[in-house]
Image: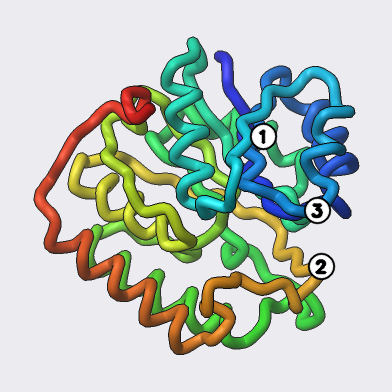
Amino acid sequence: MTFLVTIPIYNEEKYVKPVISEVKKHAEHVLVVNDGSTDATGRLLESIDGIEVITHEGNKGYGASLIDAFAHACRCNHEFVITMDCDAQHEPRQIADFAAAAPRADIVSGSRYLLPHEPREAPPEDRRRINTEVTRTINEITGYRLTDAFCGFKAYKLRPLCGLHLTETGYAMPLQLWIHAAKHGLSVLEIPVKMIYGDASRGFGNGLDNSAERLKYYMEVIERERQAPVVGRCCCRRR
């Protein structure tokens, strides 16, 4: 089984070298999408051997970074792609857990809510509240039984993933993905990941630090995708 670990990055100069160094211990193939970073991230990536890098000249968005990563993976001879973040909220040692679970479902999604966590590890209240509401809505639409709609630590089978027509460039791309996955009959499995919030002050940008605006944006994307016709497209043809 071959798999590609892909990491979207925007201004992660604090974490990029230690995180990728640890990831390389658990994965042979690593792709980083540098989404127009304006700090030292790009320079630091140039000093890391043994990884592939896609560079966006400007900040296109979290969803755009993943869509480009999926397109790259679909053009290669990997069976699976594993996505994770570069902000030290995902533990690279769990790559092995996702690789082991990947053959069991089309999408293996991490959940921070399957295991109990200490009060000091709890997410900011507005993030927890929005995650709960959005996850409930996604489950009502899709019939999935998710406990965490937003966790970025996932594994995908490439063949079914390449059949999805994903276009949402922002933070709501995972919500578009869940709805498209359900429309195409993709199977889903959740596995536990540790709840880690090292810096609760990190924001979303683009006006989304306001929780009401963030929830409004998520719900607008959900409603748009709920009403959208079923469309299949191989994302490897995107570019």
Q: Which residue is mark 3?
A: 39
Amino acid, disc 1: Val
Residue at image coords 68%, 23%: 52
Amino acid, disc 2: Gly
Q: Nearer the viewer, residue 30 or 93?
A: 30
Quarter of the image for the C terminus: give it: top left
Residue 84 visible in rendering: no
Q: Position of residue 147 (x, y in %)?
A: 47, 65
Q: Quadrant of residue 34?
A: top right
Q: Nearer the viewer, mark 2 or mark 3?
A: 3
Query: Is the residue under label 3 in contact with that under label 2 (CB below 8 Å)?
Result: no
Q: As drawn, is 117 to the left or to the right of 68?
A: right
Q: Which residue is mark 2?
A: 198
Residue at image coords 40%, 70%: 135
Amino acid, disc 3: Asp
Q: Nearer the viewer, mark 1 or mark 2?
A: 1
Residue at image coords 52%, 79%: 207
Mark with earlier residue (2, 3):
3
Q: Position of residue 41 (x, y in %)?
A: 80, 45
Q: CA distance from mark 2 to mark 3?
A: 20 Å
- Secondary structure state at the residue bearing disc 1: strand
Quarter of the image for the N terminus: give it: top right
- Check disc 1: other Cα within 10 Å, few if <14, some if 14-19, many if 20+: many
Q: Which residue is mark 1?
A: 32
Q: Quadrant of residue 4?
A: top right
- Secondary structure state at the residue bearing disc 3: loop
Mark with earlier residue (1, 3):
1
Mark with earlier residue (1, 2):
1
Q: Position of residue 72 (x, y in %)?
A: 49, 24
Q: CA distance from mark 1 to mark 2?
A: 21 Å
Is 103 situated above or below 58?
above
